[in-house]
């Protein structure tokens, strides 16, 4: 079965400093991986996706993630945090049959001035 | 495109009442998903449709929950009778290729 583990429930950074949100995955086959963001009282928005093409994936709002098969990781990074980045971030893997998404437990990113 | 549309955005009801949540997917998308989000269990897939046909309802918690998709532009999730433990945010999502899903803003359900 496919699963993801988000290693931090909360991450706090200062505005202008780098962001690192960690995600490890488990999959019995070559996975599709996603990062979604959820701002307070909003729906989920796709940040980026990996579907077996380039291992470094660039997304919206300056975020990127690198697929590392040897480490079974898909960490999300951003060089410089902005106050508007404060939100909940979900690492997601496609489940069996590809249609089913399996969500991590989420990481809440806090950005201080 | 207006994106996935859900209604109502907020619903407060009493235990035992019937609740109907509605979803309009993005035009042209042939997959539709219903999710539930709670603090305790996170995001859970309840059911999904392909071309209006239910494909997997293994996530539906019990017989009190039912979902329909009478046509390509409309789906409902019904809870009858509702219970306080059903309080959650319910999301609808749609997809054209079954991998990248677009989520609606959600319906916050409170059952008292």
Image (cartoon, coloured by chain):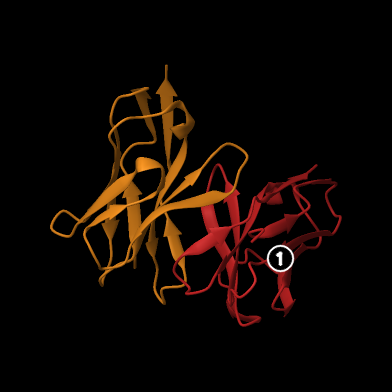
Chain colours: A orange, B red
In the rendered structure, the answer to whether residue A107 lies left or right of residue B56 reads: left
Residue lying furthest front? B1
Residue lying furthest left? A70
Element type where label 1 sits in the image: strand
Q: Is residue A21 visible?
A: no
For this rendering, which residue is in front, B87 or A63?
A: A63
Q: From what the image shows, is residue B98 above or below residue A69?
A: below
Q: From what the image shows, is residue B8 above or below residue A33?
A: above
Q: Which residue is mark 1?
A: B24
Q: Is residue B85 visible?
A: yes
Quadrant (top left, top right, bottom left, bottom right) of the C terminus of chain B:
top right
Q: Residue at 73% across / 75% down in the picture? A: B68
Q: Residue at 72% across / 57% down in the picture? A: B6
Q: Quadrant of residue A72?
A: bottom left
Percent x, y of residue B62: 66, 66
Quick one: label 1, few (<14), some, or many (20+) residues within 10 Å? Answer: many
Percent x, y of residue B83: 76, 51
Quadrant (top left, top right, bottom left, bottom right) of the N terminus of chain B:
bottom right
Q: Count the numbered circles shown.
A: 1
Chain letter of mark 1 equals: B
For this rendering, which residue is in front, A7 or A11?
A: A11
Q: Residue at 41% across / 28% down in the picture? A: A82
Percent x, y of residue A21: 32, 39
């Amino acid at each position: 079965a496919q699963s993801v583990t988000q290693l931090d429930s909360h991450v706090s950074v200062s505005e202008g400093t780098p962001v690192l949100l960690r995600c490890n995955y488990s999959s019995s086959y070559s996975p599709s991986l996603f990062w979604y963001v959820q701002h307070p009282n909003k729906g989920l928005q796709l940040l980026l996706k990996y579907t077996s093409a380039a291992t470094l994936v660039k997304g919206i709002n300056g975020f990127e993630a690198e697929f590392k098969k040897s480490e079974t990781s898909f960490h999300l990074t951003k060089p410089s945090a902005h106050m508007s980045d404060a939100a909940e971030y979900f690492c997601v893997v496609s489940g069996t049959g590809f249609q089913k998404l399996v969500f991590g437990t989420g990481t809440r990113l806090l950005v201080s001035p | 495109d207006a994106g996935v549309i859900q209604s109502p955005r907020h619903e407060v009801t009493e235990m035992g009442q019937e609740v109907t949540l509605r979803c309009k997917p993005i035009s042209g998308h042939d997959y539709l998903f219903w999710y539930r989000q709670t603090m305790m269990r996170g995001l859970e897939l309840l059911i999904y449709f392909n071309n209006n046909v239910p494909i997997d309802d293994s996530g539906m918690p019990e017989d009190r929950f039912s979902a329909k998709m009478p046509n390509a532009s409309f789906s409902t999730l019904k809870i009858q009778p509702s219970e306080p433990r059903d309080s959650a945010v319910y999301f609808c999502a749609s997809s054209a290729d079954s991998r990248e899903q677009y989520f609606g803003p959600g319906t916050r359900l409170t059952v008292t």
